[in-house]
Amino acid sequence: MEFLRLSTHNGRTKILIMKAKELQDRIKQVIVALVNSLKPINQSSSGRIIYNQVIRSSMSVGSNYRAACRARSDKEFYAKLCICVEECDETVYWLDLLMSLYPSMEMGLPRINQEFEELLKILSKSRSTIKSRMSNN
């Protein structure tokens, strides 16, 4: 299974083909970076609530993408991708909120947020591609 990957160089966006396993690994790496980056905010009660939400939504991206790769049909694949897109978008929301609430803490969140935004684009494009493929059949 192959998917699109966006790559920006000198202001130009290139679309590259990415294998499903590579995308699974990329999602896993950004989740690990996120969990490690957020350890400092887990101490306060409000920080713990947001921590739990962003960890839950980000891990859902990974688990649902893995499930999508094992789908038995295009419809099942599409349904799982829809969940991935929704959870990835939610993760971007929580990261944006964290950066607003904790602007002085250097947690590497802008880089992690950028990665989730790129994953959101990749997953959304994959979802559109599979939807058009299902419509043509």
Image (cartoon, rainbow, N blue to C red):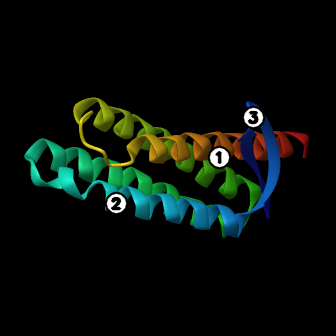
Q: In the rendered structure, which disc, 3 or 2, sits on the residue that comes first in sequence? A: 3
What residue type is disc 1 on?
Leu
Per the image, the residue denoted by label 2 is 35
Would you say residue 131 is visible in this rendering? Answer: yes
Residue 75 sits above or below residue 92 on the image: below
- Write the residue at 32% across / 35% down: 99
Q: Nearer the viewer, residue 88 or 112?
A: 112
Looking at this rendering, what residue extends furthest in the front direction? 10
Mark 2 surroundings: few (<14), some (14-19) or many (≥20) residues within 10 A = some
Find residue 73 and report its horizontal and vertical position in percent.
74, 61
- The N terminus - image quarter: bottom right
What residue type is disc 3 on?
Asn
- Write the residue at 42% across / 64% down: 32
What residue type is disc 2 on?
Val
Q: Secondary structure at mark 2?
A: helix
Find residue 67 and report its horizontal and vertical position in percent.
58, 66
Per the image, the residue denoted by label 3 is 10
Residue 69 appears left or right of 94: right
Residue 115 appears left or right of 49: right
Residue 2 sits above or below residue 113 on the image: below
Q: In the rendered structure, which disc, 3 or 1, sits on the residue that comes first in sequence? A: 3
Q: Report which quarter residue 77 is drawn in.
A: bottom right
Q: Nearer the viewer, mark 2 or mark 1?
A: 2
Q: Report which quarter residue 17 is drawn in.
A: bottom right
Mark 3 surroundings: few (<14), some (14-19) or many (≥20) residues within 10 A = few
Q: In the rendered structure, which disc, 2 or 1, sits on the residue that comes first in sequence? A: 2
Q: Nearer the viewer, residue 116 or 75?
A: 116
Instruction: Please state the total of marks drawn on the protein image.
Output: 3
Residue 101 appears left or right of 13: left
Would you say residue 71 is visible in this rendering? Answer: no
Per the image, the residue denoted by label 1 is 123
Mark 1 surroundings: few (<14), some (14-19) or many (≥20) residues within 10 A = many
